[in-house]
Amino acid sequence: MKDNGSIEMIRSYPSPNPNVVLHEILYWSEGLRVKGLLAKPKKEGQYEAMLYLRGGLQSIGMVRASRIAQFASQGLVVFAPYYRGNRGGEGRDEMAGEDRFDAVNSLEILKKYANVKEVHLFGFSRGGLMALWTAILRDDIKSVVTWAGVSDVTSMYMERVNAKNLKTYYRWISK
């Protein structure tokens, strides 16, 4: 098993912005290989970094290249983990269960590969919960933004009653 946050593979990814370079990165998190997308300005320089923690579950709310390229075009190095079990990554997406470590461990990519010291966190919906966990478990976070952040996963599922959510909810609580 490789160290958490160590990079297994980097491949170029098509960028929607001519001033931003994108790379899909396969990295290690708690013994699993997980993927994410890195965006950085083409122009060389010292940039601040942002960990973009998406919302949704599985393919719903998946990281969009245009969104993180938009942030990178403003002078940030951005990494957005897909979370385990998504887009060919190993494991199972657990909605802020053990997959919270995919966010925590992805900070190493920004620190090593992008050579930044401090990282800002930006979490949307479920990503807000992931951002809060990351800030709790790390001491090198500069700031945290949670946008429509989930604070109680159980309540979220109970408020969104439909067959698919209930099936996922019962599988999640029965672990």
Image (cartoon, rainbow, N blue to C red):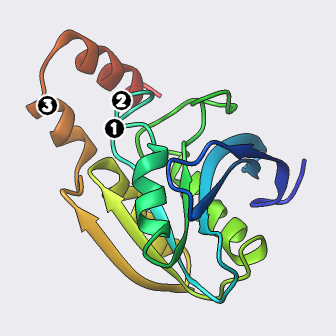
- Disc 3 residue type? Met
Instruction: Give the percent coordinates (x, y) of residue 57.
Output: 38, 33
Q: Which residue is mark 1?
A: 56
How far apart are the two marked residues, 1 and 2, measured between alpha carbons? 5 Å
Name the side, left or right, on which 165 lies relative to 26: left
Instruction: Report the residue at 36% width, 77% height from top.
Output: 144
- Numbered badge on residue 122: none
Asked if the residue under mark 1 is in contact with the one under mark 3, i.e. CB atoms within 8 Å, the reply is no
Q: Nearer the viewer, residue 79 or 161?
A: 79
Crowd class of label 3 (few under 14; some 14 to 19; many from 20; radius 10 Å): few
Q: Which residue is mark 2?
A: 60
Q: Mark 3 or mark 2, which is nearer to you?
A: 2
Q: Quadrant of residue 131?
A: bottom left
Q: Name the N-terminal-most of marks 3 and 1.
A: 1
SS category of the residue bearing label 3: helix
How far apart are the two marked residues, 3 and 2, measured between alpha carbons? 18 Å
Q: Mark 3 or mark 1, which is nearer to you?
A: 1
SS category of the residue bearing label 1: loop
Instruction: Give the percent coordinates (x, y) of residue 86.
Output: 57, 31
Name the side, left or right, on which 11 lies relative to 110: right
SS category of the residue bearing label 2: loop
- Disc 1 residue type? Gly
- Numbered badge on residue 158: 3
Instruction: Give the percent coordinates (x, y) of residue 50.
Output: 49, 72
Crowd class of label 2 (few under 14; some 14 to 19; many from 20; radius 10 Å): few
Instruction: Report the residue at 13% width, 28% height from top.
Output: 160
Using the rendered image of the protein, determine whether residue 132 is visible from the camera's viewpoint.
no
How far apart are the two marked residues, 3 and 1, measured between alpha carbons? 16 Å
- Residue at the outermost right position: 1
- Disc 2 residue type? Ile
Asked if the residue under mark 2 is in contact with the one under mark 1, i.e. CB atoms within 8 Å, the reply is yes
